[in-house]
Image: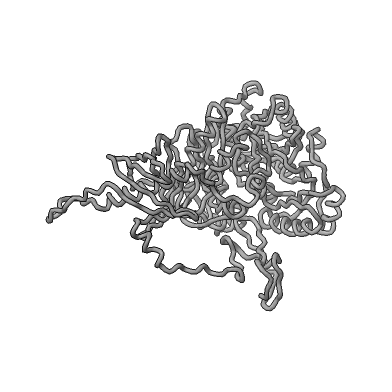
Amino acid sequence: QTFEKLLIANRGEIACRVIKTCKKMGIKTVAIHSDVDANAVHVKMADEAVCVGPAPTSKSYLNMDAIMEVIRKTGAQAVSLNVSICCSFLSSLSLQASEGVTFIGPDTHAIQAMGDKIESKLLAKNAKVNTIPGFDGVVKDADEAVRIAREIGYPVMIKASAGGGGKGMRIAWDDEETREGFRFSSQEAASSFGDDRLLIEKFIDNPRHIEIQVLADKHGNALWLNERECSIQRRNQKVVEEAPSTFLDPETRRAMGEQAVALAKAVKYSSAGTVEFLVDSSKNFYFLEMNTRLQVEHPVTECITGLDLVQEMIRVAKGYPLRHKQADIPINGWAVECRVYAEDPYKSFGLPSIGKLSQYQEPLHVPSVRVDSGIQQGSDISIYYDPMISKLITYGSNRAEALKRMEEALDNYVIRGVAHNISLLREVIVHPRFVQGDISTKFLPEVYPDGFKGHQLTDLERRQLLATAASLYVAEQLRSQRFLGTPRIPIAKSKRSSWELSVHLGDGIYPVAVSKHGSSFSVEVDGMKLNVTSDWNLASPLLSVTIDGTQRTIQRISRNASGETSIQFLGTVYKLQILTKVAAELSKYMPEKAAEDTSSILRSPMPGTVVAVSVKPGDMVSEGQEICVIEAMKMQNSMIAAKTGKV
């Protein structure tokens, strides 16, 4: 026996994920949505859908009164909730409980205790869980923040007490950064969680971020479902996760699992939850926080344990005891998850991008691939919500197999209309340090100290790209000569079988000779001959090409009449210009368009809301001075002057 109808107070991929399990269990679903999400995938998947307000989350997905009204109107017996749960909502839920509405998740006491980072740290200490040294109270103002930071010793981490998901977090290395961090963290915390309280703790430099999945019922049983390695991060948000971790030995895994269960039992926790730890190079681990919800990265745990965590949460909420004992929980194989975001990875590892998905194709034809998404072709990525496109998960009997499948899946993922971070994800998973398991939360800034620049081609890869682009150009020329039907005037067939081209890539211009043999092309680049074969289906967004026996999946992103073309090769998009020898010789007479001088303009690198302007017309500003603050997708970003001058 289970619930008849469940309301999902969430959006995007996580709402779709809950609906899938409800369908499997025969539970009817009610989706809520904002007015801009009226055509969202979760709205189409649910049995019923109700609009709860305008786009901003505070007026829709966190609009308590509207959600309570929907619960009453639809007769939902259970509620699966949004991540940012306010205490006022919890008290409303307690009222609803008396009306027979069940909350899918832990009880209000556990959410309040663990949702408050200050209280959770004290509880963890009492439960004999290792904690990070720091100040356990609420920081009143910037002056007190500086005093506390000096006492703890720099560097320190300033965090929102009610926070999560990297929002309201800043690292400070000196007094000035502490003051700035206090200001931004409290503003972000207030806008994201409606609670601007902050705490300060010692920042553990160069750690790993490893979390333990726990599952507990209302009968005092609790299990740990192994760990997830979440160290690849940017701006304190996870980018790549995997289970299990390459770093933990069975003893450390058990010790972390037992402490996580001890904490869950101390707060009488009942549902799925995550206990996050920082682990240093000597395998010392420290409690970071407990997330009282289903984490974004839960699929990797489902892959290696075979459990459906949403089903377990619904069973626990209905009052059933857990079906498993600790000894039943296996580690079968290896799973890797990449978070695919609508972001430009070339700007600080990912600044949000918005737009409509003009073309979208998930790589589900690749074996052992799972895609959790809440969007489809034609969906809008807007400034109001997180820019996540999907979670791409691959599974293998071992880590090497899971990573190889991830590489293939990323190459076969078609996303057009918005910038995306596939080039960064692919570079991370093939990087020698990542492959060896030598990672920490500083992986990205250490591997790319000057920022991410895309895949750097070797000489062989450069020749492969040039040969592929030239073959594609010739295949297109041949296709454009074909006629459908029979023309009235007989046409003399062109018997041409060789082409001399000039290909411009990066700073180089390369002469390329192409000759056709059946469906394959022989291409000469740098005095070397390469054989390129494909079915040359130019209408498909994906093209499988074999170059001298090496298979590559490429995507042609764009092309124009002047020979310019963009090709996604090894995850990165390269711009090329392909001209015939004659056209290349004439092109030097074409005037070049002068680049716009933007040094005296401050242009926002992303769409968002201006939340503060720090200057006025006539002010003198120096290079690096803050001009304004832009809030985009729940994060605040300080915009600075590129040079000294007058506003």
Q: Residue 595 or 303: which is nearer the viewer?
A: 595
Q: How is the image coloured?
A: one colour
Q: Is residue 484 left or right of residue 115?
A: left
Q: Residue 596 or 498: which is nearer the viewer?
A: 498
Residue at the extreme top: 327
Any part of residue 7 in sight: no
Give the residue displayed 43% in from the left and 41% down from the top: 553
Q: Is residue 321 left or right of residue 146?
A: left
Q: Position of residue 578 (x, y in %)?
A: 39, 54
Which image quadrant: the C terminus?
bottom right
Residue at the extreme bottom: 618
Picture quadrant of residue 273: top right
Which image quadrant: the N terminus?
top right
Q: Position of residue 471 (x, y in %)?
A: 35, 46
Residue at the extreme front: 527
The number of callouts visible is 0
Picture quadrant of residue 627: bottom right
Give the residue displayed 55% in from the left and 33% down from the top: 2
Give the residue displayed 67% in from the left and 45% down from the top: 446
Any part of residue 58 in sight: yes
Q: Residue 164 or 367: which is nearer the viewer?
A: 367
Q: Position of residue 16 (x, y in %)?
A: 51, 43
